[in-house]
Amino acid sequence: MLLVIISGLALGGLYGMTALVYNVMYSTSKVLSFGTGQFAMVGGICAAWVVLDLHWPVWIGLIACLLAGAVFGWLSELIAVRRIVAASDEHLWVLSTLALATMVQEAMSLVWGTDPTPFPRVFPQEFAGVLDQKFWLPLLLSIAMAIGLQVFYRHSMTGKLFIAMSEDTFAARARGVSTDWMRAQSYILAGVLGALSGFAAGQLTFADFALGTALGLSGFIALAVGGIGSSVGALVGGAILGTLTALTTYYFGAQYQKTIAIGLLILLLVVRPQGLFGTTQVRQV
Amino acid sequence: MKANYLKPAIVAVFALFAALLPYITGNIYYLHVATIIGVYWVLIATLNLLVGFTGQLSVGHVGLLAIGAYAFCLLAGSQGWNPFLALLTGGVICAVIGLLLGLPSLRLPGFYFAMATLAFGLIVAELALAEQWLTNGSVGMAAPSFPAPFDTPWGFYWLVLGIAAFVTWLTWNLSRFMWGRAMVALRDSTVAASSVAIPIYLTKLVVFVFSGFTAGIAGGLYATSQSYITPDAFIVNLGIYFFVAIIIGGRGVIIGPFIGAAVLAAIPELVGPLAKYGTFFYGVILLIVVLVIPGGFGELIDRVAEKLHRREQAATRIEPDLAQLRTAIGRRA
């Protein structure tokens, strides 16, 4: 039973990290990217390939995975977001990010095959039940990531500019902020964090090409439950969703996971549309 | 006006070609591809109303297609119903499920709605695999065929063609008049639409339920055309295909998505090696269309047609009809 809850919390950590990645991209561009879950997928597969197929040490795998995430994040800003944000059409970014996510997922499945492959152990540790690294690694990393992001937003110039852009892009631009480059930076950061989350949770999810879509959905539910823009909300939303998923699997079976998750999402959106920790925004007409 | 004759002429020629296709091509496989395109079109025609006209980006219609297919197989197969009754019942079931799905999710803004429908598609695929007592799990189910005149490939093709034509006619009617205007209005500006008393939520819901109904019908036809269905057939990629067909065809036109559906379905079937790259290819096309021509090929055709006609328009001058004007003013005075 303890194992069920711990594995749920670990999954929740992964979902929370995905929600944080959504937040990073949303802050500068107001885009919720369909490709968010794919960062973790690309990072996970890349690390698994470097370590297991090329037999290189784990730290090189980590670097490769972060690099892949950064490149993918930068490319997704360049290809799928920049022109769309400039055109300022509401729905087009849904389509462009969906297109990019589909392409990346298919390309990965064509190159690396469709079978989930096991992920290497990050630290030399025997399987230790509840205290195993595959549980505490994503959990601790998600908390570290949330704290790190808060510090970054509050105390670094780049972070402050992200906040400024999320408040008002035009005003930031008028004050001489290169909004295009800041947006690109936020996507690179998102790619790195997403790939890192895929690396941390690799032992939990395996390196699987289909992870991206499911994770994009779960991370989004965590985000919507917690409230867009809130780091605490992302973690809490992830933890709620992860625990609920694990308990559902334990009591009813794995086939009801998504039904329960989407039920939670719809219930919450009906009761509290801005999420648990979100702030209501008055929409301008 | 030349254009007034041109469009009906094209439609008539195409209809004749479609009706006589079994005689033109002796190849059963080409006929099968054409049938599949027709089946998809039954779904895409009304999904176009939802995505293209109303602007609700539903990725999860493949879930409704699956439910329609399984309902048809269960009712017409193991329950022994008349296939046509089963087909209609499948449509009604999907309409009800569409209503239940639409009630909460159509209140959500763009990306939330897309995610909710994506989740619905995943849930259906998951349950189809898991609920073995109902769906036979991954083993799948045999699909019954239709009675006497429609049991050959030719007969079934004509049946699909008839239903597709009927659905096209329905959507064409719906899109031209008040409903169509309301859909386009609420897509382009929800606030402006509601200020002229268009019932936003109701319009979305009716369109969604209608598209759910034909998705169910398409599901039944799809099952028969494949003659055996497994949960693998209803992956999310198929939903993305429907979606891409509409987007590249163009928002707010009917003929564009049809061409999109036909071309996208035909290419991987007819060019064998491309089948593996099908979904990747759809992603590439979607990205290019969104970036280069956001209105899709339909808009491109419109723009080209406009360019060709522009000289005529520049030459027309509107002269006031002075005599009529004078009498009109005189009558008032």
Image: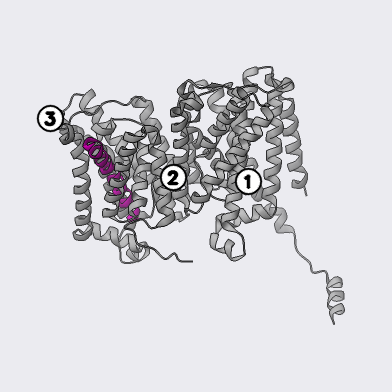
Task: Report helix, strand or loop for mark 3.
Answer: loop
Q: Amino acid at mark 1?
A: Val
Mark 2 Cα within 10 Å, few/some/many (few <14, many 20+)? many
Q: Give how far across and how far down residue A53 sits, in percent.
A: 23, 23
Q: In the rendered structure, which segment of residues is drawn in magenta?
A: A1-28
**On the image, which quarter does residue A156 sit in?**
bottom left
Q: Are marks 3 and 1 in contact (CB under 8 Å)?
A: no
Q: Is residue B321 left or right of residue A50?
A: right
Residue B25 in view in this figure? no
Packing grade of label 3 (10 A; few <14, some 14-19, many >=20) is few
Q: Amino acid at mark 3?
A: Gln
Q: Secondary structure at mark 2?
A: helix
- Left-right relation of A220 to A142: right
Which residue does the numbered mark 1 point to in the structure image? B253
Report the quarter where the C terminus of chain B lies.
bottom right
The crowd level at tag 1 (other Cα within 10 Å; few <14, some 14-19, many 20+) is many
Q: Is residue A91 magenta?
A: no
Separation (CA) of disc 1 from disc 2: 25 Å
Disc 3 marks which residue?
A: A125
- What residue lies at 45% left-to-right and 56% top-to-bottom? A88
